[in-house]
Amino acid sequence: MKLTAYRHPRPGWTRPRAAVAVGLACLAPAAAGAVLAVAGWLPDPAAFAGPGNAPPSPAHWLGTDVLGRDVASRLGWAAARFAGPASLAVVVALAVGGVLGVAEGLAGPVGRRAGRWTAQALDGVPKLVLVLLAASITRSDLGWTMAVVGLTFAPQVAGAVRASIERLRARAFIEAERCLGVGATRIVLLHILWGHSRRALVSQVTGVLAYAVLVESSLSYLGGALGVQEPSASWGNMLALARDGLFHGAWLPAAAPAAAICVTLLGFRLVGAGLLGALEDRP
Amino acid sequence: MSGPLVQVDGLCKSFRPPGFLAGGSRTPALRGVGFTLGGRELVGLVGESGSGKTTLGRCLLGLTAFDRGTVRVAGFRVDRLGRARRAFAREAQMVFQNPYAALDPAFRVRTILGEAVRVHGDRDEPTARQVERLADLVQLPRGRLDEFPGRLSGGERRRVAFARALATRPRFVVADEPVAGIDPPVQVQLLELVRRIHAARPLCLVLISHDLGAVRALAERVLVLYRGRLVEDAPATAFFGGRALHPYSRELLRSAYDAPEILAGPVGGVRRPAGRDQGCPYRHRCGRATGSGGAPCATIRPALDPCGPGHRVACHRWEEGEQP
Amino acid sequence: MSRGVRWQWLGWAVGQAGAAAVVLLGTSLVLFLVVEAAPGRGPDRLGTVTAAAGGPVAPRDRAGWAVRYGRWVAGAVRGEFGSSTAVQRGRPVAELLGSAARRSLSLSAAAFGLAVFAAAVVAAGRRVLPGAAGVAAWGVHLASALPVFLLVYGAVVWLNPAVARGAASGWWDAPGWFPFPSRPEGAAWWLGAGLLAVGDGFLADLCDRFSAQTDAVGAAGYRVGARLLRLPRLAVAVRATVPGVADHLAGRVTFLLGSLVVLESALGWPGLGYLAWRAAAERDLPVLLAVAVLLAVVVRTAAVAAGLVRAALDPRYRGSG
């Protein structure tokens, strides 16, 4: 498709396409690890397979941790285990945020105020404190914790939805659709959210995912019965377990999960920033 | 169904300054407009910028809520449409002022027209064929159907906008400035297109324009708005044939056709005195009122009264317009 | 400013404060109900609920939830949040909160100030040195990927041996803040504030936003007009950038407080965050509820303050209710 129309030079950090490409490349290792784990091509993550803190070898690509378990396998399994709860966070954030945002953008004065106040109330408590409350009450059930992560991100999603509705609602083409008799649901879903806001929504999704990774690894690292518990693997608790080894020169069991966390967070951020930067339709 | 297709009575609309608790007074846009339109008329609605043309057009289609008065279009009370909007959309449509903004830039023309067809069109015929017939109707090359609106020329966009409005087979169409801002040759083609469409379909068309040339080329009847009031309602032949009776209409015609005379014409202050003004709203710019004492002009607001066959005018001294 | 405008201002500000109060009440009510409905109340790691435990988990309170919530609010207004059930069992929550709140808020205020300053420098630097913009962009992207706990981890692992080596080789006497996470004082405190400012993408986000705002303002036609008119540049820049930035900053407070929880817990520094984490770990729900509501007050105050700043600089905003 030829798109030769002149575009204004955009203010922004980076070239959007480069950012998205690098971001996807950063997300690839975690995704590949999760796929390998689920496909069963990685050794048992809980088996004490060899000596502690062993260097990399063909049997253990990233060596073993202090208890002699395969680091690569634990990394992959942690990603695989986390995929479901993280998707739950995304679903909750999109559902609740979508409803709130549509209420704020389209409902009458009462509904609008109710939507805004609900969003403000949700946004008021620091996200991590709400997550701590949820983890504490549900005894650190990862699904519930991530659902609450999604819930705490609902105001952000609602803000994005509301902003695009308000930006587009007054535009003539939406009014023309209305005049044509197209239903409000179809206008909001197809024209506003899908037609003109999908990149913004996807960048919200990457924001939720990044925060989910951050919260999960933070809680698991801090321990205290809140995050993922041993013997289940999580990047956070792998890092916590490897801490003492660092002082004896065994840096790989700590560096591997640290790198996994950083690279994944970077990937989500770059994809989000790239999509936002590439927004076709700027006001 | 009995009665005229469009019936407007005492329509008033004023705009509130935006914001909660905002100060300032409301800006009136329409002050008691009333007229009726019959089955297959082609009406030109003219007036200067800010006279309320676009607001009136939007009120006719229920896109803007108004304060007082009634508007009935094809049996619908347009201020109480509610769930009947879809049924109403089959009766009345609008061609929007700015086709650059009125077509969703994220969808191809085929999708845009297809949506209108899917909502309203014939269920027996495939959507694609109906879309192509619409494109033929407005003389849009079929190849252009797969473009995004951003790649179309101004004239093509107007054709698409017309096609979309016609997709619902309406009996009443309001076209807001359909030829503003395009080249004269394309304007001529578009006007010709509008005339053909009007001839081919049972359609009542209101043409909102500040361009008297376009109105002269098409319209059979002319409505003149001045600051939210209808000041003249004349057959086009009379209006353009030297029998425009309201001084404001004459000013419009003069400014359109022999511009230099404006400089010599009587240009009074446009500002209105504060308080409730009972006089003729036009008298400050009017040569007749200032020229001859102006007893009724300053105290009594003229009503829109008949002055000839199919011709009404809101002026106390309209007879003075009879002599050239 | 005419009289009508002034009244409008006052009405707007009162409306904002009232809305904030309503929102806060709603927040605390929901939190209260969640805590009330939590299955298996009380600590499950440190034994059973004691009869002395007050507040929302007092087991003998058979009144309806509305009455109990009313009592809780009345107590909160008097500064009583019941007693801790686990963290320091039997101790009034208000006592625990007092000193913790002071420490935590000063630490987060320092981090906030550092981040705002650094982001403003980066945003201004991009306009002065356009060539460095790309480098700055990727630097900011990289910094955004560093969680606070990882920064703390790195600081502990890397800093302590380095200081120990320095002290052993006689370069300096053992500094007072060694080993690193010992006490939140002096250099360690400032280091903590710096980690809080950079970590969890806080600084990166501010850089993004500040740069976007300065770009947008720089591109706006009225800036050019103001330059031609020789209006004072700083005043024009402040008027144009601050309204957009203030809201965003207020919205980031919640993230900063979340990072504070992680930082304090990872370092073991006493403060609201550490309290929240321990209360969560030990299911000390009265403490957790009190911390949550206190932090909600902080967040909402920041939002109202941002709204006021914005309204003072951008008259359109007042209209939008």
Image (cartoon, coloured by chain):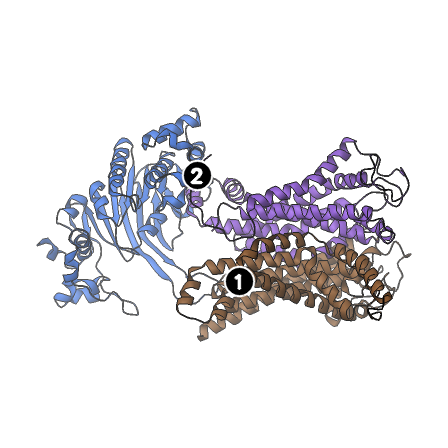
The kind of secondary structure element at disc 1 is helix
Amino acid type of disc 1?
Val
Which residue is at a point 72% across and 61% down the rendered structure image?
C195
The N terminus of chain B lies in quadrant? top left
Let me know if residue C62 appears in the view.
Answer: no
Chain C drawn colour? brown
Q: Which mark is residue B16?
A: none
Chain B drawn colour? blue
Q: Is residue C158 left or right of residue C14?
A: right
Against B11, residue C244 (above or below) is below
**Front-lying residue, A67 or C163:** C163
Residue, far left: B323
**Front-lying residue, C109 or B265:** C109
Q: Position of residue A166 (x, y in %)?
A: 50, 51
Q: Is residue A46 left or right of residue A149?
A: right
Chain containing the residue with disc 1: C
Which chain is tinted purple? A
Which residue is at a point 45% across and 34% down the rendered structure image?
B111
Q: How many marks?
A: 2
Q: Position of residue A263 (x, y in %)?
A: 70, 46
Amino acid type of disc 2?
Arg
The kind of secondary structure element at disc 2 is helix
